[in-house]
Image (tube, rainbow, N blue to C red):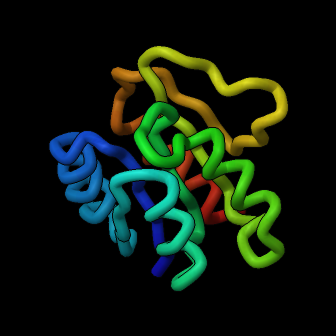
Amino acid sequence: MATVLLVDDDTNALCALKELVGQEGYRVTTAANGAAALRTARAERPDVVVSDCMMPEMDGMDLSRAMRDDRTLAGVPVVLVSALVTPPPDVQTAGFLRKPFAVAQLLEIIDRLVTA
């Protein structure tokens, strides 16, 4: 069973996504910001990370950069989501969705990345 790490400082959005992604058969872990997500990912390497861009403490773009610089996490695909910003060119992502997005779009991206 593939593990998806969901990262968002919006508790309601995080709970809803956790439920929906979990219903698809994925094991889901969560974090409220990029720093917590990095600790979680280092403790138990996820198969995919889905992160909001704008969060306190460490945003999704800095999380993506930190993961790329970490030898054990560099191969984990990161999907960023945001209502306001587009990731800069130096942030490597496996996908980007603008909020609000259809959950089916996100699940399609996760499925593709897990089976790649």
Q: Residue furthest front?
A: 57
Q: What x and y, as percent, mark residue 79?
A: 58, 44
Task: Give the residue drawn at x 57%, y 61%.
Answer: 48
Task: Give the residue drawn at x 44%, y 64%.
Answer: 36
Q: What x and y, as percent, mark residue 88?
A: 74, 24
In this rendering, position of residue 94 left or right of residue 25: right
Q: Is residue 18 above or below residue 101?
A: below
Q: Is residue 35 above or below residue 109?
A: below
Q: Nearer the viewer, residue 94 or 86?
A: 86
Task: Give the residue drawn at x 38%, y 38%.
Answer: 104
- Kindly indicate the quadrant of the structure image that contains residue 31: bottom left
Q: Is residue 1 above or below residue 8?
A: below
Q: Residue furthest top?
A: 84
In this rendering, position of residue 28 left or right of residue 114: left
Task: Give the residue drawn at x 36%, y 69%.
Answer: 28
Q: What x and y, as percent, mark residue 75?
A: 77, 66
- Kindly indicate the quadrant of the structure image that contains residue 60: top right
Q: Nearer the viewer, residue 39 or 96?
A: 39
Q: What x and y, as percent, mark residue 30?
A: 35, 63
How many numbered marks, from 0 up?
0
Q: Which quarter of the rendered picture does the C terminus lie within?
A: bottom right
